[in-house]
Image: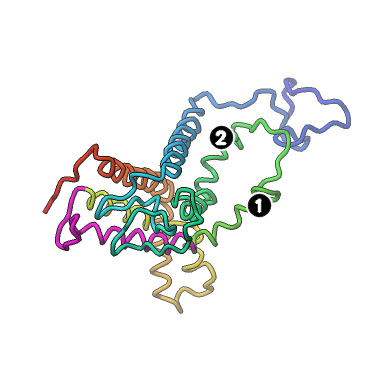
Amino acid sequence: MATGTEPHLKKGTDPGGVRHGTRAAIGAAHLRTDRWWVQPAATAAGLLAFVVYSTWRAFADSDYYEAPYVSPFYSPCLAENCAPMRDGPNWEIFGSWWGLSPALLILVFPLGFRLTCYYYRKAYYRGFWASPPACAVAEPHATYTGETRFPLVLQNLHRYFFYAAVPVAGILTYDTVLTFRDEHYAWGHAGLGTLVFLVNIVLIWAYTFSCHSCRHIVGGKLKHFSKHPVRYRMWRWVGWLNGRHMLLAWASLVSVALADFYVYLIASGAFDDPRLF
């Protein structure tokens, strides 16, 4: 119903988007009176902090290994210029020609998995691009093409990054098992770092399994759950995790940064790893 306050449009013009001619012509930018901008601003600040920290650590190429701990940013270490990791997953696939930080060889997979994640897409679309900035708040862009054009069409690679993220999580699990050794590689020991790595790997697996692609792989193509009781139970469990996907996304993001920072502290000599037993 017209109210008499609608913005006047010249005949034949159509601004598109939320001002499309078929939509209600409301003059106000939005009708929300709460502090709707707090959440996208906090999201942008949190993501930016992680980007700055991870970029620094990825290019630092130092203080990422102190027996028995190896930073999750650098594992598996695939270059010849990696710090020595006895009994560790150091395959040296890339020879001496690789002169950059070895973290740049592996971070593309977990970061690609998170960058294309459905939740993270919503988070940084709102936080950085204001697309849209919040529910019931119009975005400032004149046109909208969704994820149908380059580079956003690459978001469809998410399912393939999931396949790459699973073995990476498996290797980080192996790294966590190795933390039950002391600096002389004797088993039956545990330090504070062991606890840090345990919490981190649990959160990484929980986030990985809560992925929408994982939920689809487990039970998305089934027509009759009654004929697949095991997969149905797995689908229910993954669905329960999926309902907490946002929480797990943030918790695992913080935990992986803390695990790396912990290794940095002990490798740089700023902190001695306390032994629990």
The answer to whether 34 is drawn above or below residue 56 in the figure is above
Q: Earlier in the sequence, mark 2 or mark 1?
A: 2
Q: Is residue 34 above or below residue 20?
A: above
Q: How is the image coloured?
A: rainbow
The residues colored magenta run 164-192
State the residue at coordinates (85%, 31%). Answer: 13
Q: Is residue 119 left or right of residue 274?
A: right
On screen, residue 82 above or below 130:
below
Farthest top residue in view? 5
Q: Residue at x 46, y 64 (%)?
A: 93
Q: Could you say which is closer to the camera, residue 174 or residue 1?
A: 174
Identify the residue position indicated by label 2 in the image: 128
13 or 121, which lies in front? 121
Residue drawn at 48 percent across, 62 percent down: 164
Pinpoint residue 20: horizontal percent, then vertical percent: 75, 35
Image disc number at residue 153: 1
